[in-house]
Image (tube, coloured by chain):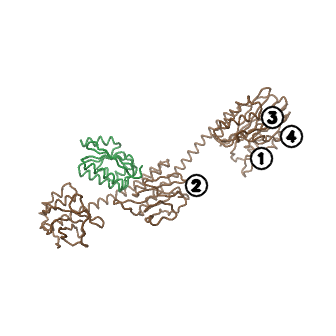
Amino acid sequence: MTMPVSTAGLEDLWKRVGAILETDAPLPSRIAEAALAATGAREAALYLRERDAWVRAGERLAGEADCPPLPDPLPEGIFVRDGDLWLPLSVEGEVHGLLRLLGVESAPESSNALAFLFGAVVGANRLARQVRDAEFELKARLLELESLYDLGLSLGGQLDLSALADEVLFRSISLTDAGKGTLVLVEPSGAVLLERSVGGDVFAARDVKSWSLPDGGLINNEAASEPTSGLALNSCQKCLVVSIAVPGRRLGVLAVADKESRDGRVLDFSATDARILSLFANQAAAAIETARLHRDAVEKERMERELELAAAIQRQILPRDLPNVAGLEIAARNVPTRQVGGDYYDLFPLSRGRLGFVVADVSGKGIPAALLVSTVHAAVHLQIDEAPTIADLFARIDRHLQRYAVTRKFLTCFFGLIEPDTGTLRYVSAGHNPALLRRADGRVEQLGATGVPLGMFPNATWKEKETTIGAGDLLCVYTDGVTEALDSREEEFGMERLTTLVASSDSPDELCKAIFAAVDAFAAGVPQYDDQTLLIVRSKT
Amino acid sequence: MSETCKVSSERRGDVAILWTDGYINNQGGEEIAREAYSHLDQGVRALVLNLEKTRIVNSIGISILIEVLEKVMDRKGMLAFCGLTPTIDKTFRIMGLAQYAEIFPTQDEAMKKVTSQTA
């Protein structure tokens, strides 16, 4: 049975139910209570359209939770079905709700007016909800804009990569309503610099540098059934992946997955989502690059401070003045490079007019090399009076290094002992460049290594050799910074040039100046990366 | 931060404090709503939501919080938030939550105000 809906009796009905409809109770309860008051029915239920189904509104109302099967299409007006009266609540032909009066088989007089009135109420309520949803959407768009603005401001001053990654990832997940998200930053080598995930890891691997991604980001709303080729992703239903890149270089990848809905479904990612994520990735790329440059600058500053400290250590260790030893002329000079190597020289006036001297070159540069030089310096000063021979001195220094050196480095070392009285030179060379002994007649002899570098092998031994050093003989001990000085073609100064210079001069001072002048001229302004040290001794007697 | 949002609560007189830990999305929002409605049904008049262990909220979570707020207002009750990150604070203000619910920096400040108004 169906009946047309009319508005007759609406005013009278409003007087009876209006007060109930204006209460603060939830809308379904208000409608049901008003319907009962207007019709005298015992129970009422209200069903509202939720997407494609009729869903009971108001948990405490009568009727089954699931709407009973109804004719499709619905009758145009009020109808009776299975002993209940059904009032379609419609506005301008669109049915927004169904009021069910249980156990009522004949339409009360007020039914038409009731259907019209409640139709208007439900329609207005739906309209209000649509307005509210639209307002919510508008606010959500405003939030997106504000977030982009805030992210720009926040990242602009953010130099902590970790905090920066959190900021980008959290906002990305939040604004796309994603269930999970992952951000991976990589070094230029491809090694992972930093990774963050929320809700689970979107990626199954980290070889993100080689992934092929379009400029605007990659949307895969069929990820569950069609895995994204070329990208190692963990199982997800839908995903959106964008590249974080500066021109010519990928810094990382940002991905979100499984966009949520209020009813628990996983929604498709949209072009708007991809645009937002791409904008975030662009801002992140600029900020990450800035943070990286800052980190590099801080590292450079730290290294410069370290070099200054190393240079200070070295300056403290090298002798300030050269000793006066009867029968000997001495010159020595150390030219440290900007990177501070580990050259060391020292002189020890000993009893009976003897002179001990050492020239050493530590492997490596900076603080570690400076510390090792410091250790060697201490060991030499501690042991020089105790050791019966130079070879024994070297064994003691080596044991000291093996036991106390904080870094596993080694050094080449030449130690000489001149006895002017006897014209004897005894020496040990631990893998050091050959010292040059220029005889008074101009011949130049090389005093080669008598053992391995110090600190290299435990229990190593060194041979002690002896030669004469007579009147006019000159000994030149140097470090490889001299012979390996480079010119602009990366050619080395070499032994030949040094030997020629040594052969041509009788004065240690003049020879020292001449060698450094020749090396400078050879290098012609090319920066050198190794210390240069010379120690020259000439016997006058 | 937890993978899934955990919600714990404690009733103090007419006020219930809810602590969240994790992402307030659909799941997290539902957890909050369940806990909040349970307290409201037992006569609690005011809710204080402490979000100090939450760093992300999405729009689904916000819409559920709005539903909770509406239910609290239907019952003439009061809802307050505290422990918000600056980002979430701004999000709540833009999305309108701050129009009807007060936001406090700390739980103590929120409790002081809520307790004085429900006494």
Q: Colour in which chain A is shown?
A: brown
Q: Which of the two residues, A507 or A2, is positioned nearer the viewer here? A: A2
The disc, 2 or 3, on the residue closer to the chain's N-terminal end is 2
Q: Identify residue for label 1.
A: A494
Q: Identify residue for label 3.
A: A426
Gap between marks 2 and 1 measured at Cα: 37 Å
The disc, 4 or 1, on the residue closer to the chain's N-terminal end is 4
Amino acid, disc 3: Arg
SS category of the residue bearing label 3: strand
Q: Residues within 10 Å of mark 3 (few under 14, many from 20)?
A: some
The disc, 3 or 1, on the residue closer to the chain's N-terminal end is 3
Mark toward the viewer: 2 or 3 = 3
Mark toward the viewer: 3 or 1 = 3
The disc, 2 or 4, on the residue closer to the chain's N-terminal end is 2
Gap between marks 2 and 3 measured at Cα: 52 Å
SS category of the residue bearing label 4: loop
Question: Chain drawn green, letter?
Answer: B
Q: Identify residue for label 4.
A: A442
Q: Is residue A516 visible?
A: no
Gap between marks 3 and 4 measured at Cα: 21 Å
**Which mark, by number, is residue A189?**
2
SS category of the residue bearing label 2: loop
Residue drawn at (22%, 67%), measured in percent from left and top? A91
Quick check: A40 left or right of B59? left
Amino acid, disc 2: Ser
Name the outermost residue toward the right: A441
Indicate the quadrant containing the C terminus of chain A: top left, top right, bottom left or bottom right: top right
